[in-house]
């Protein structure tokens, strides 16, 4: 075979395209300065926490920006404290259970609200959402009485249930809007392709709503992990105490000493799962996963 | 392979709206059936009832001898191509096409084989591992078709599959769909609002209006023998001209003069039992007007009149000439609906307008004549044959050109120069519409 020589076609357009450069964006110095100021403002408390957690003894009362004798003593001591490690485990169990149930039940409820034709849909959604507006303190006391009576006081289940009442409405509300975004045609295509309703939900809707599910999971986990008031009211011993309460109950070496160092170290430790979680899920929380499904 | 039969099928929504009324339709095995009509006529609802995505309120739907009213979509063994393709965005093209087979628990090797086969037919092989988001509109459309083909279903349902493509691609895909159906020989029900698609694709076409099937016939018979005003106005582009007329003896009085009726016309009127003096609506296809300068004066049953051409549109091979006519308003639900569809661009919100709609809605009192350069060429050939003493079959067609004078006439059309032009109507020739004047279906 003889290849015909084809002259390379260079069009004016191509040259123009090659020459075009993205215009340089100059960020003015004052913008950088403001950004830096905001970052410092937001992160300073956290830095101070870290700062304190690395100090011991008399250093604690000093205001040094850099710890004069940095040490990890506080960290080693909290992990030797059974009250803290037990609380850490309790927190993990309660938060993860709340998150799991919240996301699963929430996605079912949200799917029904988003898709099914039914009456009183909006009032129902409004009612569900209005639950989140109740001040927690309003239910803390009655719940304490009720839990004591039916034997849920000072148990992990006794924490998961009230947490769900706050987590579910929020997950439902977020997920409804995510499910509504997913074109109905996709489910119908799945049905015609031979899927049952549940298969269509699991194999088509859920993967597409993944960013929404991740967002809900993170929010639920953070709320449950950080919750203090109910945990404080509804627990009385190490059996069910969660980390925020346990930290508050740390005792110093004497009655007059505030256990500032260990409390700070513990606070740093319990922040880590949240930071890791957000970084992990960040990739999933990207919009545009539905791009290309339908003609856009 | 399956027949699809609608037996008195109704669709009522809870709010009382009846989307499909007493539908009776038989789609034969291996047939390409088109459902066509303006938006909201119930054609998509009918299709979705076949798919099982809409409940049937009343009547029986039978696929392949089995009543399927109560079957879930997954048990019906049908494939559907959606208007917006509905590809699963989180799956690759291969997974998209194999999804149905995977659900049916077919083993992976067999799935791969079938997907490759379908991809081969649609030339999708290079794209099998891409996600839908990275495909062009035409490729997505092909994937949607591939998803249907890979399953090898009893029948295909297509819900306006081409309406999201640009005009050029749509014509290409139209041909491909036709070829595909012929190649596979699978029953296909195809919904469209585009009468061009309907005319070019279907073995048979069902024209729907307001939930009722108006006429089911081959494209040719729909064009030549429309059952009523709606079908007459819907089928054909540019569409048929309607003017009010008065039937008197063997002629009909039109706004532009009195036209003698052909024998076939009179026969048709007699058999319809309407051959007496009365007001009628007369439909004339654009191609049955011709320039008097180039018309054959020897042909019978014609009306000669003068009209001022105010707009000429050139389509390349054809010219559309628009002229005004002094006429009374015609009142007819059928025509009002057609005009409404035109004004709103026919298709529903968000869909691309079909090119035919870009023309401004033609006022009813306007006539449109179409001339065809091919007809002129044919006529010149006829002239040549005739001069050699050979018999000539009359092409049942429109504008004819003769000699240099007519050429200049056409070129003045081409320049779009509005001006006074002599017009002749060919009320008698080939226009089944005329023979229907006064028929019951035409009374409003």
Image (cartoon, coloured by chain):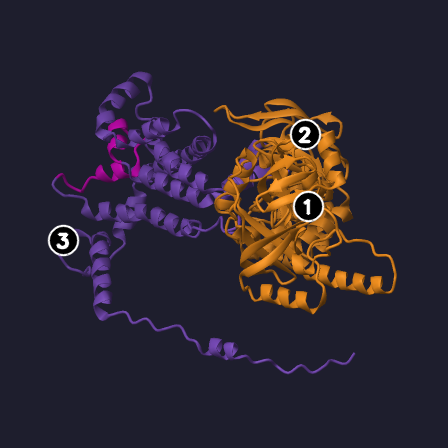
Chain colours: A purple, B orange
The 10 Å Cα crowd at callout 2, few under 14, some 14 to 19, many 20 or more, is some
Which chain letter goes with mark 1?
B
The 10 Å Cα crowd at callout 3, few under 14, some 14 to 19, many 20 or more, is few
Does the CB distance between marks 2 and 1 fall below 8 Å?
no
Q: As displayed, is residue B296 above or below residue B276? A: below
- How many angstroms separate mark 1 from mark 3 (CA)? 112 Å
Does the CB distance between marks 1 and 3 fall below 8 Å?
no
Residue B310 % position (x, y): 52, 57
User: Under tag 3, what secondary structure?
Assistant: helix
The region drawn magenta spans A228-255
User: Under tag 1, what secondary structure?
Assistant: loop
User: Under tag 2, what secondary structure?
Assistant: loop
Residue B217 % position (x, y): 72, 38
| Residue denoted by label 2 | B274
| Residue denoted by label 1 | B427
Which residue shows up at 36% across the image and 73% down it? Answer: A23
Residue A3 % position (x, y): 73, 80
| Residue denoted by label 3 | A58
């Amino acid at each position: 075979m003889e290849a015909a020589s084809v002259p390379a076609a260079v069009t004016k357009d191509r040259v123009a395209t090659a020459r075009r450069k993205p215009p340089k964006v100059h960020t003015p110095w004052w913008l950088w300065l403001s950004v830096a100021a905001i970052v410092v403002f937001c992160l300073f408390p956290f830095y101070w926490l870290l700062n304190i957690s690395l100090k011991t003894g008399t250093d604690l009362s000093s205001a040094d920006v850099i710890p004069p004798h940095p040490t990890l003593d506080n960290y080693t001591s909290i992990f030797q404290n059974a009250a803290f490690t037990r609380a850490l485990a309790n927190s993990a169990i309660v938060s993860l259970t709340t998150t799991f149930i919240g996301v699963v039940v929430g996605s079912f409820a949200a799917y029904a609200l988003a898709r099914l034709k039914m009456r009183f849909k909006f009032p129902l959604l409004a009612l569900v959402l209005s639950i989140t507006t109740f001040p927690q303190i309003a239910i803390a006391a009655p719940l304490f009485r009720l839990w004591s009576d039916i034997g849920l006081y000072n148990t992990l289940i006794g924490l998961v249930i009230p947490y769900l009442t706050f987590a579910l409405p929020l997950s439902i509300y977020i997920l409804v809007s995510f499910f509504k975004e997913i074109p109905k045609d996709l489910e119908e295509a799945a049905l015609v392709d031979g899927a049952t309703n549940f298969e269509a939900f699991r194999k088509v809707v859920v993967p597409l709503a993944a960013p929404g599910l991740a967002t809900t999971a993170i929010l639920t986990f953070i709320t449950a992990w950080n919750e203090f008031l109910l945990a404080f009211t509804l627990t009385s011993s190490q059996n069910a105490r969660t980390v925020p309460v346990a930290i508050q109950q740390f005792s110093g070496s004497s009655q007059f000493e505030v256990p500032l160092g260990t409390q700070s170290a513990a606070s740093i430790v319990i922040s880590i799962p949240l930071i890791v979680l957000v970084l992990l899920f960040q990739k999933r929380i990207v919009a545009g996963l539905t791009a290309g499904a339908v003609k856009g | 392979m399956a027949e699809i039969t609608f037996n008195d099928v109704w669709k009522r929504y809870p709010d009382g709206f009846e989307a499909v009324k007493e539908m009776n339709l038989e789609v034969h095995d291996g047939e390409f059936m088109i459902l066509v009509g303006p938006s909201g006529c119930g054609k998509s609802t009918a299709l979705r009832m076949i798919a099982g995505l809409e409940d049937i309120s009343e009547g029986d739907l039978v696929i392949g001898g089995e009543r399927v009213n109560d079957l879930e979509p997954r048990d019906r063994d049908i494939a559907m191509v959606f208007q917006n393709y509905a590809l699963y965005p989180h799956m690759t093209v291969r997974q998209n096409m194999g999804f149905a087979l995977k659900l049916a628990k077919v083993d992976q090797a067999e799935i791969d084989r079938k997907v490759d086969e379908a991809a081969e037919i649609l030339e999708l092989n290079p794209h099998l591992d891409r996600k839908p988001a990275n495909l062009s509109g035409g490729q997505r459309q092909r994937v949607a078709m591939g998803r249907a083909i890979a399953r090898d279903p009893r029948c295909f349902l297509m819900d306006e599959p081409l309406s999201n493509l640009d005009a050029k691609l749509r014509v290409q895909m139209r041909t491909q769909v036709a070829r595909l159906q012929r190649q596979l020989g699978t029953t296909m029900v195809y919904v469209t609002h585009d009468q061009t698609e309907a005319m070019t694709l279907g073995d048979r076409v069902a024209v729907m209006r307001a939930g009722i099937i108006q006429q089911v016939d081959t494209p040719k018979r729909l064009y030549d023998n429309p059952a009523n005003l709606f079908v007459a106005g819907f089928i054909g582009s540019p569409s048929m001209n309607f003017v009010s007329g008065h039937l008197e003896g063997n002629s009909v009085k039109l706004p532009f003069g009195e036209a003698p009726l052909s024998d076939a016309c009179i026969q048709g009127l007699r058999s319809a039992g309407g051959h007496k003096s009365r007001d009628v609506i007369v439909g004339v296809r654009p191609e049955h007007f011709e320039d008097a300068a180039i018309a054959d004066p020897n042909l019978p049953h014609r009306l000669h009149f003068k009209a001022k051409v105010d707009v000429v549109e050139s389509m390349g091979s054809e010219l559309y000439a628009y002229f005004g006519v002094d006429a009374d308003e015609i009142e007819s639900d059928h025509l009002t609906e057609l005009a409404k569809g035109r004004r709103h661009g026919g298709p529903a919100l968000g869909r691309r307008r079909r090119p035919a709609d870009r023309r401004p809605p033609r006022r009813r009192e306007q006539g449109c004549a179409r001339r065809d350069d091919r007809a002129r060429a044919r006529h010149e050939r006829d002239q040549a044959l005739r001069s050699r003493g050979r018999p000539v079959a009359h092409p049942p067609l429109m504008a004819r050109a003769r000699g240099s004078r007519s050429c200049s006439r056409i070129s003045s059309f081409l320049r779009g120069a509005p001006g006074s032009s002599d017009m002749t109507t060919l009320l008698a020739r080939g226009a089944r519409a005329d023979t229907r004047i006064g028929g019951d279906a035409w009374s409003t």
